[in-house]
Image (cartoon, rainbow, N blue to C red):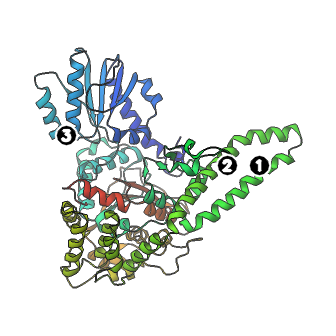
Amino acid sequence: MAAHLSYGRVNLNILREAARKELREFLDKCSGSKAIVWDEYLTGPFGLIAQYSLLKEHEVEKMFTLKSGRLPSADVKNIIFFVRPRLELMDIIAENVFSEDKLHSSREFHILFVPRRSMLCEQRLKEYFEFHTSYRFVAECYLENDQTSLYHTAKGLMTLQALYGTIPQIYGKGECARHVANMMLRMKREFAGSQNQILPVFDTLLLLDRNVDLLTPLATQLTYEGLIDEIYGINNGYVKLPPEKFAQKKQGEASKDLPTEPKKLQLNSAEELYAEIRDKNFNAVGAALSKKAKIISAAFEERHNAKTVGEIKQFVSQLPHMQAARSSLANHTSIAELIKDITTSEAFFDNLTVEQEFMTGVDTDKVNTYIEDCIAQKDPLIKILRLVCMQSVCNNGLKQKVFDYYKREILQTYGYEHILTLNNLEKGGLLKPQTSSRNNYPTIRKTLKLWMEDANEQNPNDISYVYSGYAPLSIRLTQVLARPGWRSIEEVLKMLPGPHFEERQQLPAGLHKKRQQGENRTTLVFFLGGVTYAEIAALRFLSQMEDSGMEYIIATTKLINGTTWIKSLMDRPECQTP
């Protein structure tokens, strides 16, 4: 599984192995038989680094999902809770432990906080257990960066440097990027004597705040992978799809016998066809699937040409791969059909038209009739918020009259409880009244060529294909940094939020890389606050361009789309966009 991590110049499998090593060491500290109680949210991320076989090797005999009440019975010495630092989860843990203590007084309990321990959670546990039992807190395990934790981002990047060598150049844009870089440099000074003598794999680190480019996540992604995420959501490399398209209905079989459970599919580059089409504009996917179908069909036809024992044997040896390819083709043809049903609808077209009008600066300073109609029809609130926020971002804020109108209509239609959501969007800079008559977006758009007319979706020659005309600002900044450099766009950088900076890290003697002729440089692009699949596709496209001279590796605090991003502000009243 996930063999693709070993491909390319940067062997990312090293990172997964380091995480596995940390997990193994923690499990071995809890000697004896074990049962793990999972915070359900963490099962996906942990599944990416360790299968059950690894846990079993370290005496894990049972696994349960964290729930209120008594734990299921398990004859083990250790109960380990794998949880996020959330107060409501501490209450459930306490309930579990009290019910167990009465039955198994000799049993030991442990907690692994992911991504970090929390003083509030520790305090809550002390309130429960001060007089009941002795709680042992173990080192936290770094698996995913918390969107609000700059310290842990810096710590994670230091871990990367311990595995892949010191990164000589650091560039950044935004307040959070500046803080992370400062923390990294301080950590480097504090551990100056313990540097690993590793030849650097990365030439450059680019730190980008999400709020430097608020527009891109709001736009509808138009790559194959991006649309899967927009419509169905990709979680930890898996997608759940309507089962009807995947049911092999036999003749005469009643519809009531068809599966009702969603079809769960894994999506990663280890699957040859998915690796080939994931980054394509959706309008180019049909032709790619048709071409693949002809290749697979021709391969199966070869069986008729196999005459000798050797030829038959060779065909049989290739059969498992061919059958896997045919199954993969069937799955992605079904997914493409599901997506096409949506992208060819009038509603999708109308929504996309308004998005593209905003991105090109059309009528961003007045109430939009399409948004008005959507509110009147009580379309999903997320859809409304994405469009209103996009209009605000493209106009450097809404005129006070327009801002007040949208706010009033949204609250009257969807409920006054959403005033918190609107306040959070305002704090995050996504939705705000205009405070200056000057709108910098047209200048930024023209200077960075953010809108490209007649973007080539079939055979792209520019990153704008991922949004059928719009080039993501974040990726354009990355592209310009590589060539000709940020000094050429100094004035535009000043128009964007937060400082921009450059830092150099001194390499130990003898570790300066001697570049071979024609060898690409490698840049690690770290998105603070999330990245979309379309942005990832655009970076992969830049890596594959013949004249780019650069290979990009992508890291982020979270994979997002416009819906999940806005939802995060709705779910947590105090949340702010970094």
Q: What amino acid is at disc 3?
A: Leu
Task: Say which element carries label 3.
Answer: helix
The mark nearer the N terminus, 1 or 2, is 1
Task: Say which element carries label 2.
Answer: helix
Query: From the viewer's perspective, is 273 left or right of 67?
Result: right
Residue that appears at 10% across and 22% down: 131
Query: From the viewer's perspective, is 522 left or right of 389?
Result: right
Residue that appears at 37% across and 47% down: 160
The mark nearer the N terminus, 3 or 2, is 3
Check the image and report above or below for 348 versus 369: above
Percent x, y of residue 94: 20, 29
Q: Disc 1 versus disc 2: distance between alpha carbons?
A: 10 Å
- Report if the CB atoms under discs 3 and 1 are less than 8 Å apart: no
Judge by depth and name the residue closer to the eye, 273 or 519. 273
Q: Disc 3 versus disc 2: distance between alpha carbons?
A: 48 Å
Residue 578 location, quadrant: bottom left
Mark 2, Cα crowd under 10 Å, few <14 / some 14-19 / many 20+, is some
Residue 230 location, quadrant: bottom left
- Residue ID for mark 2: 326
